[in-house]
Image (spheres, helix red, strand yellow):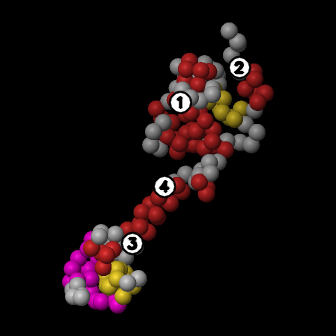
């Protein structure tokens, strides 16, 4: 069987520089990556497009993903902090008709301000409201019928919230 000659060929960021023997029944090649790293790749992975870098692209993608999750520090190990949970619940009540409390919030026209929505919304919410103190939850005050927005929200105890309840119709 004729052996492929791949030295000098480029596959993504990889340049084949030498033969590396046989790995799992396939010819393997030593490749130099544009980032300066090296990798040993099987011929099938090179020709099939599975091997495109020494792993630097995957490491970069993982570090970017990790940086996004560290951006505000409120999702350690993928779990929301109390502050993040309050923020998420606020959005859910106002924007998801399948939320159990929709009729009392979004269904009545209560919404979350633009500042606290979309990309960077949580960071701006955190700037405006600060960390959620122990024993307190998000309350719309002084206007209990108003939207969630700076100037109409506070962290309040259950007894403070009970004093701010709307009258049953």
Placement of the C terminus among the 4 image quadrants: top right
Provide the residue span drawn in magenta.
6-21
Q: CA distance from mark 2 to mark 1?
A: 22 Å
Q: Residue 104 occupies which quadrant of the picture? A: top right
> Of callouts 3 and 1, which one flags the residue occurring earlier in the amino acid sequence?
3
53 sits to left or right of 67: left
135 sits to left or right of 106: right
Viewer-nearest of discs 4 and 1: 1
Image disc number at residue 56: 3
Viewer-nearest of discs 3 and 2: 3
* 79 vs 147, nearest the viewer: 79
The residue indicated by pointer 4 is: 68
Viewer-nearest of discs 3 and 4: 3
The residue indicated by pointer 1 is: 96
**Residues at badges 3 and 2 in contact (C-beta under 8 Å)?**
no
Q: Secondary structure at mark 1?
A: loop
Q: Secondary structure at mark 2?
A: loop
The residue indicated by pointer 2 is: 165
Residue at (52%, 45%) from the top-left corner?
Answer: 123
Q: CA distance from mark 3 to mark 1?
A: 40 Å
Q: What residue occupies the far top of the structure in this picture?
A: 169
Q: CA distance from mark 4 to mark 1?
A: 25 Å
Q: Is residue 60 above or below residue 39?
A: above
Viewer-nearest of discs 3 and 1: 1
168 sits to left or right of 78: right
Give yes or no for residue 17 being in the magenta stretch: yes
Q: CA distance from mark 3 to mark 4?
A: 18 Å
Q: CA distance from mark 2 to mark 4?
A: 38 Å
């Amino acid at each position: 069987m004729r052996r492929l000659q791949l030295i000098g060929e480029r596959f993504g960021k990889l340049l084949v520089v030498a033969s590396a023997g046989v790995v799992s029944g396939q010819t393997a090649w030593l490749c130099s990556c544009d980032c300066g790293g090296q990798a040993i790749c099987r011929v099938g992975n090179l020709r099939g497009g599975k091997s495109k870098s020494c792993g630097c692209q995957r490491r970069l993608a993982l570090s970017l993903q990790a940086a996004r999750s560290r951006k505000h520090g409120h999702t350690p190990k993928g779990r929301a902090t109390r502050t993040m949970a309050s923020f998420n619940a606020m959005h859910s009540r106002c924007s998801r008709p399948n939320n159990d409390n929709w009729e009392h919030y979004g269904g009545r026209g209560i919404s979350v301000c633009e500042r606290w929505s979309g990309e960077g919304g949580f960071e701006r919410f955190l700037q405006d409201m600060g960390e959620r103190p122990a024993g307190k939850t998000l309350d719309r005050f002084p206007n209990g019928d108003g939207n969630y927005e700076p100037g109409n929200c506070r962290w309040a105890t259950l007894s403070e919230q009970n004093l701010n309840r709307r009258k049953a119709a």
